[in-house]
Image: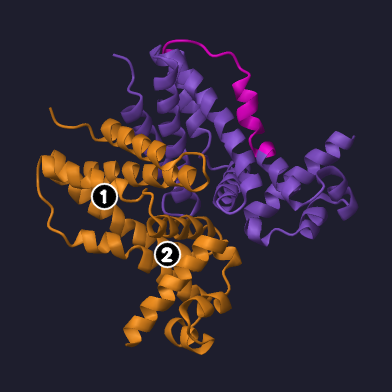
Chain colours: A orange, B purple
Amino acid sequence: MANDTRQRILEACSICIARDGVRGMRIQDVCTQAGVSTGLVYYHFADRDGLLAAALEYVNVDSVARREEPVAGGVGSRGLLLELLLGEIQDDESVRAKSIVWNEIRAIAVFEPPLARHLSTSTAAWQSHVAELVTGHTGAGTEACRETALLLTALVEGISGRWLSGQLDTAAARAALKRGLDAILPERR
Amino acid sequence: MANDTRQRILEACSICIARDGVRGMRIQDVCTQAGVSTGLVYYHFADRDGLLAAALEYVNVDSVARREEPVAGGVGSRGLLLELLLGEIQDDESVRAKSIVWNEIRAIAVFEPPLARHLSTSTAAWQSHVAELVTGHTGAGTEACRETALLLTALVEGISGRWLSGQLDTAAARAALKRGLDAILPERR
């Protein structure tokens, strides 16, 4: 029950951020969206920073779920990787909302060290999942796979920024991402 | 003289954004930083949006200057391209400030269509300069070079985000960028 409320507040928070940005997000709007009292929000998240950090974790939950799936070796890994990366850019309201939350928090973390730490943890988790899939495909050493994963995830972030600001439509952004994967991690012949 | 004042206000605006973010930037702080009256700021830029758009153009001036340099073909182009891309990530206060301004405006453009249009114009100009250097190196067709330039510039944006939020230090960010260029636009054998 308490867990349901927490989820509901986080979903509401992610909707508010996607609509108004972190700058425009007011705790009161999150309460209205979630249908809960401000007291309940502060009970679960202590303060605005706590809510933002939890929202970041929340938008990261899909990746966490995928992270727990077993990683197949060989061609399977690259297919999964392509799917995982393309999953970040889709014509789907919830995917777009989550991407906006990430994008906002990335920008704001430049000025807010506590948020930067949460961002760093979330990004590292995502990146090591990607590195695992790279290893499954190439069998290369840990360091090389980590470097490849850094390029792939940074490219997703760069292309997502173009997509969210309307410089690329969904199809063009996905096509660019696929070309990027082909260049950075070519298919095995 | 009027031009000097304009430049001074834009430099001050870029310093304020780098320090406080666009969210924290107040016209009054820009005036104090530039040593001018609010009236003068509104005279030159009409409103806050006008000032932000002009600041984006201002931080883009370096690239514009480089864009006017003649593009050499062959190995020279790739060297210039590497230099141009690495130029975005340097241990230099002014480079970092400009990068923060870009990063902020990219994030905010998601919510502000007029700013998104300015961003799109600036990005397109930068990207076509990069495409020109790619053409100089590969001699490939326009569309292929444009696609390569999209990947390279999006990668710069993604890696810059990691750098600005302290997830990568300058050396690591530059090394990643160089590896990205090697993957996306390999040196000719």
Q: Is residue B161 positioned above or below A70 on the image?
A: above
The subunit letter for the residue under badge 2 reads: A
Mark 1 or mark 2, earlier in chain = 1
Local crowd at mark 2 within 10 Å, few (<14), some, or many (≥20)? some
Please state which amino acid type lies under the numbered disc 2.
Arg
Residue mark closest to the camera, 1 vs 2: 1
Residue contact between numbered discs 1 and 2, judged by CB atoms under 8 Å = no
- Residue B109 horizontal/vertical position (percent): 58, 49
Along the line of sight, the residue nearer the viewer: A20 or A135: A20
- Left or right of A13 on screen, residue A95: left
Q: Give left or right: position of A176 versus A79.
A: right
Q: Which residue is more in the foreground, B115 or B169?
A: B115
Check the residue under mark 1 and report the chain it is in: A
The residue type indicated by label 1 comes to Leu
Q: Which residues are magenta?
A: B57-75
In the image: residue A121, left or right of residue A21: left
**Picture quarter with the C terminus of chain A:** top left
Query: Where A135 sits versus B68, above or below?
Result: below
Question: Distance from label 1 to label 2 (Cα)?
Answer: 24 Å
Q: Give me the disc on residue A84.
A: 1
Query: The residue tagged with tag 2: helix, strand or loop?
Result: helix
Q: Quadrant of the N terminus of chain A?
A: bottom left
Badges 1 and 2, same chain: yes
One can see residue A104 in this view? yes
Residue highlighted by disc 2: A117
Residue at image location 89% in from the left, 48% down from the top: B40
